[in-house]
Amino acid sequence: MTPKQLIFVSEYLMSGNATQAYKLAYGVQDDDVAAAGASRLLRNVKVVEYLKEFRNNITMKTEITVEKTVEEIAKVAFSNIADVLKAKKVKDLPEHVQAAIAEITVTDTKQGKKRTIKLHNKLTALDMLMKHFGGYVTVQDIINKLDEEDTNKIHQYLLEKIKDLQDPS
């Protein structure tokens, strides 16, 4: 890899933002130019192999895998506050229930101790799982599945609608 490619990869691994990494590595100011360059680099065989090897090394050193991460997110996504309220002590809760707890605060009141339990954001966890498993369908996904003939038909239809909006007579 070239020195600039190494800078790009290093910046990309730190920030996760390919466009910004390209701008820093290549001294580019224009976002569109940087996005196009970053896209090309992320398809470059040497860059792809380097990123893959780096991620594999991190996985081996930390033992963090996609599977483990998805399991942890699923614990939050499918948590139930009723499971938390069943136990008097946190240590009595099953591990998957404990994983869903974000915060426990205890405050003294006139009536005694008040325990407040806050769970991690369930909607965020569900959203993360949906993205991971491809549960969302975007307009771009639909467009990508169209053949050229259907794409041309939609294009013509949209052009006619735009023309009608511009000239309502």
Image (tube, rainbow, N blue to C red):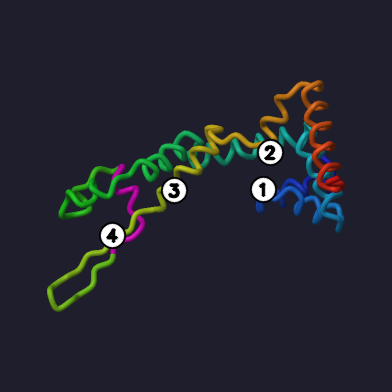
* Mark closest to the chain's N terminus, 3 or 4: 4
Q: What residue type is labelled 4?
A: Ile
Residue at horizontal 24 percent and vertical 50 percent from the top = 84
Distance from Cα at disc 3 to Cα at disc 4: 17 Å
Disc 1 element: helix
Instruction: Name the one closer to the observer, 157 or 26.
Output: 157
Distance from Cα at disc 3 to Cα at disc 1: 27 Å
* Mark closest to the chain's N terminus, 1 or 2: 1
Can you say which quadrant of the picture contains the C terminus?
A: top right
Q: Position of residue 17 (x, y in %)?
A: 70, 50
Part of the protein shown in magenta: 96-104
Instruction: Name the one closer to the observer, 140 or 121.
Output: 140
Disc 2 element: helix
* Mark closest to the chain's N terminus, 3 or 2: 2
Which residue does the numbered mark 2 point to in the structure image? 51
Which residue does the numbered mark 4 point to in the structure image? 117
Which residue does the numbered mark 3 point to in the structure image? 123
